[in-house]
Image (cartoon, coloured by chain):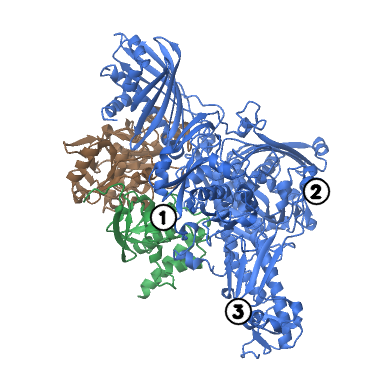
């Protein structure tokens, strides 16, 4: 068919869509409030809603769960406990053969605050939560351990009795000859790091809609799961169905994930079982309190990293000792956080000798999982801190130390000592470009001027290799070569894309990439538009996954920044393959060789003669309308599905070398910080980040990923921490205490680019989503260390911590004992003291303390005291502070009796709002008129919901409640008028009805 | 996080509200702006039997200035007071402190009296009330009474309000001539609860510093004037007496250091503002 | 007004984006749930349900407010605007929305409706708002995707375009 006089432009590379920032197709709907996130979607008629009862204890045996009242409540369809789940499922697969199981719900024991205990299925979420309040659980608390070193010690409380201790697996690796290198080293430099726990907390929480078909014995689940779909078989196995009876679908839109929506998978199992038991579809939308306590977090890690260094600062060898804290369960895919970076333990540096000792330990904290950066922050923090220490201890310029160790450009592709193949990059040139384009000189001058003016100013650096596209085989690295041989090889990363043509000749693309805001639908449209000579708006992309209908594999999903290198790459291959076949059809029709066919501007024609062309849609529709006209060797041209796995992703070899990722970007950052001398707050004065992420597919989106990663990293460095008390109480339970940075805290970094395309990916692109999570925390820490002259610094670098280095030490108050600092960091024992005057003689007061009738009158809000023995009482107590009121079961014991002078009262209280444990020494002293001065000193620990949501108020609460008790005692005995301060006011409170 | 069930009354006149309070007492909660109460309901920390919405009582919506007092009714939202014409000259401490309360979006709904009745230890409005020596008007079916701020705030989220009483209004003393006022706050992020907040009132002969966020309620104390060498020790004593505690966000030591430094700066600023 | 009983459903009516709407709610129902699930306007999102993240921000009687901190019954008789009311037509976007698209001010889009409602009010009341004021006004909104820079750029761009539009008129 002759063209209609349109010019056919030369398109070989002239006007590619890839590489340009076009407006995103996703945006119009999202901006108009027409997004389709999971909770926006319709549900099947009859769908019920679930609420989950979660443990307030960090570690306890479950003695009994009584769901009778809950089951009988209005609108309740089912109450599911661990026993019910266990009857219908198998344990989730555990990554390391360790003899432990991993259930998605507590069965006999709870092991972290927030662990699910029971699921209520009701007509709506409001009523489901009403029923949660009616479930009675009797716990036998066990000692908890939250510190990884303490958990690894031989006397630690053990979480999984079937295992010997909490350390799951120890693995040592050796590459090259590290021992000789260390022996010969001119210097040994070492850092000890405790990397904290944090999580990327997307604004949308988990959502699951599950249905069970008893006739088919099949589950159908819609959930905002992000992959990797290697967890599909884990879920199917747990649900005891073959993979083809576990249909997993994802919604069109997801409100952010950053790795976090990988760990929704145990909840998928739970809600699926709940649907089966209830006999109706069940929907569960996680709330924020659940999310913070019970979803997932990144690992915290204790690391010792030592370097063998020559006097020029060249690092000859590294010795890593990593203790990885995976929380209460070794939940799949852990210990992946530890092994994702295994090939990159030498970072950006050319170091041939490496020794690694890895241990995984379990603690009474949330189980860990994927999180943006996934293992990178935990590796680069010690490594780049070490580089700064080398510079300081050897009195070298930190930039020189970096330069001298960088992998040289001519070595690319470079095989690291531990097995990764760095695909491309000129690290040295990139560093120099960053220094000049980023104006390091000017920053240095700024620093000098600030210091001259007496300010605390510092500059820090970080050089990081950012891996992307994980090798699914890396998870077998901790196995021995023998174990790997027995189990069979695991390797590769199958990415898939399908390009289809419809009867009107329009193009659709499907991928299993589950985006959560990364603009996949736009970028893929650009990629396919380039391949087929179309405009991006002519290409429609769907990214929802349906495991029953779509092409997918275990690597499917959106994690390890695999979209640009792998998914978009697979799409390009599919587009080109389809194009080749269409070209052969066009060649036959236009009577030119296939190599002469050009696709441009929606037309397919001869390169030499622009008028000899056909519209793309016509050629594209041919496969539907006239398949008989297509030569059989061309095949069908309706749909092209490509599975692409890069050959470089080989299984770990006999020497435990593993190419853990396909592509490696390079990042070099430097920044200047100033620390406020009054508040200790860090002001990030200037931050320069240079990225080489290979070929850039969409510059504005790359900038978006870098800015987003930077903000996450800034949070990790300065604001965010998953904080636990020593008894495992979870303290950062709301967004008021887990501090996500806002517009006021996040400055804009200066972003620079270089492009070293990857030879291993179809588009030359590398991943870019995680890099700053790896580089920024340590870059900021290095700058702070520089500003304050610190040899050690642990994150988050809060003002309170930093001010301690700036303010001169306090002088203790004369005549007043300074509150004793509790040992062992992270303790949160509340302590206090007080006194009350009671108008009765000490022995009278003594008798009152031991008399249950008195106690009933005196314990605030007590109703029903049960005497277990002369020195042991139980009571039901209603306690209130302001509007916060709850019922508690209290247990009080008296010990160390020294009648009538002193006694120790030990008590615990437990209720829906929280739990408290305390002990106090009470002394009774007669005064001149033989009245009694009751003085007490107490220690208390408070956990549960009130600790999670109101941590900063707990001290005041404990003080108030304990004061209430002693004042009531005084009042009961007919106390006199002299009251001091708070106690007097509290007494007035008590005159109100409880 | 959904609230437990409660009855709801939208009071049309104040007697109606007071009747419910008298009847349901401690099982009733007043709902004004809801910015503090509603999350407590959602988290089921509070489970009242009935909630009384007072935002439609016309008598409670007024801001009245006169006789050296700014009287703010219980239905006045924080942003209404913030936007009050010439608030900065009527009472600079209020103008300085109001923008620190939460965020614009919560100030659009939260009320002045609600924050005072809630008595969070780090809240700005109770701190300002204590610094200025203001008063709270309480009303029940039995009686109306006025309570000085120092007596009203009893402890953490605990006030002198009886179960059958409504905070009908609060009274902030207006700026006095020859007196300087200053407010400073340090928190972790913009809009967060104060780690330490300071409000200073300085005239020719007295300096008064009120500190919030440290003790279980805001505390005010007369201190030596800025420039007096005795101020340093007095600030130090004040810092210790506030009985600071460690928590997730700051150590007790840090809080004391801020009381010393921020307290001094705030007093000095108030002294400078005396012009 | 009669005491609304805890266990019953009550009729709640208000103006939503200029139209009268009505639905049934218990007195404990949050406005965010009422808007999303009773009225079916799912553009307003729930991110924390305790008033910190700002995703649920709507306009109540002209001012941005957190719908998760409001009971549905409190909204009786008010005028509420949500993100669905911003676009001038089903197939067009407002200048503010366009500015967000032009400046890549969103990635996952979950926090975006709340931010748009705050900015819509701010730029109406303070058309000359510059960056510091915009940043402060948006400090009550959490975003985990963008790092906020592109959001602020979009807001400034929108402010400029709205001023130009106003000057032309």
Badge 1 element = loop
Discs 2 and 1 carry the same chain letter:
no
* Contact flag, marks 2 and 1 (Cβ < 8 Å): no
User: Distance between the Cα atoms at labels 3 and 2?
Assistant: 49 Å
User: Is residue B1 visible to the viewer in this orientation of the structure?
Assistant: no
- For the point 54% across and 31% down, which residue is it? A61
The image's mark for residue A503 is 3
| Residue position marked by numbered label 2 in the rendering | A653
What quarter of the picture does the N terminus of chain A occupy? bottom right
Within 10 Å of disc 3 (Cα), the crowding (few <14, some 14-19, many 20+) is some
Q: Which chain is brown?
A: B
* Secondary structure state at the residue bearing disc 3: loop
Position in image of residue C10 (x %, y %): 29, 54
Q: CA distance from mark 1 to mark 3?
A: 43 Å
Residue at mark 1 = C56
* Chain A tint as drawn: blue
- What is the C-alpha distance between the residues marked 2 and 1? 52 Å
> Picture coordinates of residue A826 (x, y %)?
54, 33
Pointer 3 chain = A
Q: Are marks 3 and 2 on the same chain?
A: yes
Chain painted in green in the figure? C
Q: Is residue A716 left or right of residue A476?
A: left
């Amino acid at each position: 068919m002759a063209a209609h006089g349109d010019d056919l432009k030369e398109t070989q590379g002239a006007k590619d869509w890839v590489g340009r920032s076009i407006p995103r197709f996703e945006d119009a709907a999202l901006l108009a409030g027409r997004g389709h996130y999971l909770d926006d979607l319709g549900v099947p008629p009859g769908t019920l809603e679930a609420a989950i009862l979660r443990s307030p204890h960090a570690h306890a045996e479950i003695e009994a769960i009584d769901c009778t009242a809950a089951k009988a409540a209005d609108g309740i369809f089912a109450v599911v406990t661990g026993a019910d789940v266990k009857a219908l499922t198998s344990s989730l697969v555990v990554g390391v053969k360790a003899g432990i199981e991993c259930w998605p719900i507590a069965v006999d024991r709870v092991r972290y605050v927030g662990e699910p205990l029971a699921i209520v299925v009701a007509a709506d979420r409001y009523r489901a939560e009403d029923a949660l309040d009616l479930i009675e659980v009797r716990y036998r608390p066990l000692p908890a351990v939250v510190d990884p070193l303490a958990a690894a010690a031989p006397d630690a409380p053990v979480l999984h009795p079937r295992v010997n201790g909490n350390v799951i697996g120890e693995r040592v690796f050796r590459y090259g000859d590290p021992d000789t290198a260390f022996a010969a080293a001119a210097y040994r430099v070492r850092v000890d790091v405790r990397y904290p726990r944090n999580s990327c907390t997307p604004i949308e929480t988990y959502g699951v809609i599950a249905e069970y078909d008893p006739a088919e014995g099949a589950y159908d689940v819609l959930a905002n799961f992000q992959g990797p779909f290697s967890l599909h078989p884990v879920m199917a196995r747990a649900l005891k169905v073959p993979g083809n009876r576990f249909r997993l679908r994802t919604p069109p839109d997801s409100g952010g994930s950053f790795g976090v929506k990988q760990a929704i998978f145990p909840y998928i199992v739970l809600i699926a079982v709940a649907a089966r038991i209830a006999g109706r579809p069940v929907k569960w939308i996680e709330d924020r309190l659940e999310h913070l306590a019970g979803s997932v977090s990144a690992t915290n890690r204790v690391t010792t990293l030592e370097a063998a260094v020559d006097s020029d600062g060249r690092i000859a060898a590294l010795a890593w000792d990593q203790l990885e804290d995976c929380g209460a369960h070794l939940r799949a895919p852990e210990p992946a956080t530890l092994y994702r970076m295994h090939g990159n333990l030498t970072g950006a540096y050319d170091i041939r000798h490496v020794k690694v000792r890895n241990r995984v330990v379990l603690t009474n904290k949330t189980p860990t999982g994927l999180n943006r950066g996934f293992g990178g922050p935990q590796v680069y923090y010690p490594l780049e801190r070490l580089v700064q220490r080398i510079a300081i201890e050897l009195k070298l310029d930190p930039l020189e130390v970096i330069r001298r160790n960088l992998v040289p450009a001519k070595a690319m592709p470079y095989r690291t000592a531990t097995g990764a193949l760095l695909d491309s990059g000129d690290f040295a040139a990139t560093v120099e470009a960053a220094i000049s384009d980023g104006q390091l000189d000017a920053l240095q001058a700024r620093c000098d001027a600030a210091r001259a003016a007496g300010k605390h100013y510092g500059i820090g650096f970080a050089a990081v290799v950012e891996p992307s596209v994980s090798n699914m085989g890396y998870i077998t690295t901790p196995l021995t070569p023998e174990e790997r041989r027995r189990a069979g090889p695991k390797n590769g990363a199958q990415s898939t894309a399908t390009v289809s043509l419809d009867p009107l000749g329009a193009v659709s693309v499907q991928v299993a990439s589950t985006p959560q805001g990364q603009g996949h639908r736009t970028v893929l449209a650009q990629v396919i538009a380039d391949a087929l000579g179309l405009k991006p708006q002519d290409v429609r992309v769907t990214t929802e996954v349906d495991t029953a209908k779509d092409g997918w594999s275990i690597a499917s999903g959106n994690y390890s920044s695999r979209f640009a290198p792998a998914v978009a790459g697979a799409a390009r291959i599919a587009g080109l393959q389809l194009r080749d076949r269409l070209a052969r059809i066009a060649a036959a029709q236009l009577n030119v060789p296939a190599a002469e066919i050009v696709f441009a501007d929606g037309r397919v024609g001869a390169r030499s003669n622009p008028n000899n062309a056909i519209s793309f849609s016509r050629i594209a529709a041919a496969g539907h309308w006239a398949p008989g006209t297509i030569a059989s060797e061309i095949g069908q041209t309706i749909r092209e599905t490509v599975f692409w796995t890069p050959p470089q992703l080989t299984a770990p070899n006999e020497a435990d070398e593993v190419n853990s990722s396909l592509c490696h970007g390079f990042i070099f950052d430097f920044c200047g910080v100033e620390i406020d001398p009054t508040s200790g707050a860090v002001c990030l004065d200037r931050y320069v980040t240079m990225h080489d992420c290979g070929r850039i597919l969409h510059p504005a989106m790359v900038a978006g990923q870098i800015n987003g990663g930077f903000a996450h990293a800034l949070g990790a460095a300065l604001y965010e921490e998953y904080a636990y008390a020593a008894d495992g109480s979870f303290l950062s339970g709301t967004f008021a205490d887990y501090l996500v940075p806002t517009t006021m805290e996040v400055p804009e970094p200066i972003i620079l680019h270089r492009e070293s395309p990857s030879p291993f990916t179809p588009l030359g692109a590398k991943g870019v989503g995680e890099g700053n999570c790896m580089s920024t925390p340590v870059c900021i820490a290095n700058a702070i260390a520089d500003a304050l002259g610190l040899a050690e610094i642990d994150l988050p670098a809060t003002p309170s911590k930093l001010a301690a280095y700036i303010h001169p030490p306090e002088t203790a108050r004369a005549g007043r004992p300074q509150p004793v600092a509790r040992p062992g960091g992270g303790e949160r024992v509340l302590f206090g003291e007080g006194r009350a005057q009671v108008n009765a003689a000490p022995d009278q007061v003594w008798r009152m303390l031991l008399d249950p009738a008195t106690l009933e009158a005196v314990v605030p809000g007590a109703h029903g005291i049960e005497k277990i023995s002369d020195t042991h009482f139980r009571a039901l107590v209603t306690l209130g502070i302001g509007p916060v009121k709850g019922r508690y079961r209290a247990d009080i014991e008296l010990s160390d009796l020294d009648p009538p002078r002193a006694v120790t009262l030990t008590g615990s209280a437990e209720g829906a709002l929280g739990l408290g444990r305390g002990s106090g020494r009470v002394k009774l002293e007669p005064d001149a008129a033989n009245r009694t001065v009751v003085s007490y000193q107490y220690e208390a620990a408070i956990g549960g919901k009130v600790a999670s949501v109101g941590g900063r108020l707990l001290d005041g609460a404990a003080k108030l409640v304990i004061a209430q008790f002693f004042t009531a005692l005084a009042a009961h005995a007919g106390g006199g008028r002299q009251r001091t301060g708070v106690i007097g006011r509290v007494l007035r409170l008590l005159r109100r009805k409880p | 996080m959904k609230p437990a069930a409660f009855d709801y009354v939208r009071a049309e006149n104040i007697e109606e509200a007071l009747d419910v309070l008298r009847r349901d007492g401690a099982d009733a909660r007043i709902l004004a702006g809801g910015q503090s109460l509603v999350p407590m309901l959602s988290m089921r920390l509070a489970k009242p039997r009935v909630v009384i919405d007072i935002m439609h009582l016309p008598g409670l919506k007024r801001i009245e200035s006169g006789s050296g007092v700014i009287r703010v009714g219980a239905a006045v939202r924080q942003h209404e007071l913030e936007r009050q014409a010439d608030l900065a000259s009527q009472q600079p401490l209020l103008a300085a402190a109001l923008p620190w309360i939460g965020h614009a979006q919560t100030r659009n709904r939260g009320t002045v009296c609600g924050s005072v009745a809630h008595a969070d230890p780090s809240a700005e409005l109770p701190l300002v009330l204590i610094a200025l020596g203001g008063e709270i008007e309480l009303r029940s079916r039995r009686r109306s009474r006025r309570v000085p701020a120092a007596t009203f705030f009893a402890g953490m989220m605990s006030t002198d309000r009886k179960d059958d009483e409504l905070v009908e209004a609060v009274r902030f003393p207006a700026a006095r001539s020859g007196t300087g006022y200053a407010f400073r706050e340090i928190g972790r992020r913009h809009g967060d609860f104060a780690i330490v907040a300071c409000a200073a009132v300085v005239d020719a002969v007295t300096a008064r510093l009120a500190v919030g966020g440290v003790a279980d309620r805001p505390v005010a104390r007369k201190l030596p004037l800025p420039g007096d060498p005795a101020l340093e020790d007095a600030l130090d004593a004040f810092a210790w007496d506030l009985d600071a505690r460690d928590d997730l966000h700051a150590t007790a030591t840090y809080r004391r250091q801020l009381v010393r430094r921020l307290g001094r700066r705030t007093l000095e600023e108030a002294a400078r503002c005396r012009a | 007004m009669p005491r609304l009983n805890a266990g019953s459903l009550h009729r709640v009516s208000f103006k939503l984006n200029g139209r009268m709407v009505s639905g049934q709610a218990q007195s404990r129902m949050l406005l965010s749930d009422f808007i999303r699930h009773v009225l079916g306007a799912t553009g307003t999102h729930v991110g924390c349900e305790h008033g910190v993240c700002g995703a649920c921000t709507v306009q109540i009687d002209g001012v941005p407010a957190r719908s998760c901190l409001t009971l549905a019954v409190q909204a009786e008789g008010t005028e509420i605007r949500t993100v669905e009311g911003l676009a001038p037509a089903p197939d067009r976007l407002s200048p503010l929305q366009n500015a967000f698209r032009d400046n890549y001010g969103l990635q996952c889009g979950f926090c975006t409706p709340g931010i748009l409602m705050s900015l819509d009010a701010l730029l109406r009341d303070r058309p000359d708002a510059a960056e510091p004021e915009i940043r402060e006004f948006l400090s009550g909104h959490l975003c985990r995707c963008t790092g906020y820079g592109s959001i602020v750029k979009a807001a400034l761009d929108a402010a400029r375009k709205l001023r130009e539009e106003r000057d032309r008129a």
